[in-house]
Every structure is written in structure tokens, then in C-alpha cells.
């Protein structure tokens, strides 16, 4: 994706809009820092990020989860002789 500085974007706005309408995308930067992304209106929306909880109702956590294997862990680390 091409980056254009804001001065160039203001100077050549009509050309940039035509290119975007043909399907190109641009990033407009100010002092080298990306500020905005210009994309065609018919560009596909980005897919939403994956969220936690996608296995809700499919996995059961035992009630003693926080203490499971504690005797073995204590034995391995020498806490219990």
C-alpha cells in the first residue's frame, strides 16, 4: 500500500480519488507518521478479531482446578519431602 504525504494528497486529491475509485488504497502520512487509510467504498470490511469464549458451553472446568496436582507439584519442587 502506497504512503502519500498530506501535502501531496491535498495537491493531487482528484487524482488520488480516481485511483482509489479504481480499487487502490493509500495511507496518508503527516511528517512521516501514518494518519489515515483511504480505501474504496466497496472494499471488503476486515473480519472481526477472534474473541475469547469461542468454546463457551463446550468445555467444563473442574471445581478443584486451582489446586489440581498441587501435591505432585509440591513433591517435584521439594516442598514436601
Image (cartoon, grey):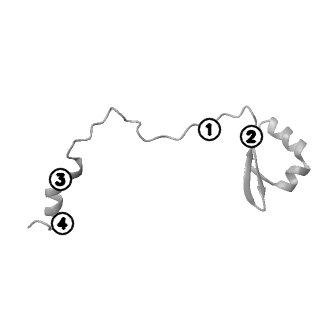
Q: Is residue 55 left or right of residue 76?
A: right
Quarter residue 32 falls in: bottom right
Residue 68 in percent (x, y) is at 19, 50
Q: Which residue is mark 3?
A: 69
Give the camera-side residue of 14 and 67. 67
Quarter residue 62 falls in: top left
* The C terminus: image quadrant: bottom left
What SS does tag 4 mark? Answer: loop
Q: Residues within 10 Å of mark 3 (few under 14, many from 20)?
A: few
What SS does tag 2 mark? Answer: loop
Which residue is located at x 88 percent, y 50 percent?
A: 10
Q: Residues within 10 Å of mark 1 (few under 14, many from 20)?
A: few
Which residue is located at x 85 percent, y 44 percent?
A: 16
Residue 6 in percent (x, y) is at 83, 54
Q: Which residue is mark 1?
A: 46
**Which numbered disc flags the more N-terminal residue, 4 or 1?**
1
Give the camera-side residue of 58 and 15. 58
| Residue farthest to the front, as pictured | 63
Disc sitting over residue 77 in the figure: 4
Q: Is residue 24 left or right of residue 53?
A: right
**Which numbered disc flags the more N-terminal residue, 2 or 3?**
2
**Which numbered disc flags the more N-terminal residue, 3 or 4?**
3
Disc sitting over residue 39 in the figure: 2
Q: Is residue 39 left or right of residue 6?
A: left
Which residue is located at x 18 percent, y 59 percent?
A: 73
Please report contact status of discs 1 and 3: CB closer than 8 Å, yes or no.
no
Which residue is located at x 70 percent, y 34 percent?
A: 43
Amino acid at each position: 500500500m502506497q504512503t502519500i504525504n498530506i501535502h501531496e494528497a491535498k495537491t493531487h486529491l482528484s487524482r488520488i480519488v480516481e485511483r482509489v475509485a479504481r480499487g487502490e488504497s493509500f495511507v496518508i502520512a503527516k511528517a512521516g507518521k501514518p494518519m489515515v487509510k483511504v480505501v474504496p467504498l466497496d472494499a471488503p470490511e476486515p473480519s472481526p478479531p477472534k474473541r475469547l469464549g469461542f468454546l463457551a458451553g463446550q468445555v467444563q472446568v473442574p471445581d478443584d482446578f486451582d489446586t489440581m496436582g498441587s501435591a505432585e507439584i509440591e513433591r517435584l519442587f521439594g516442598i514436601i519431602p
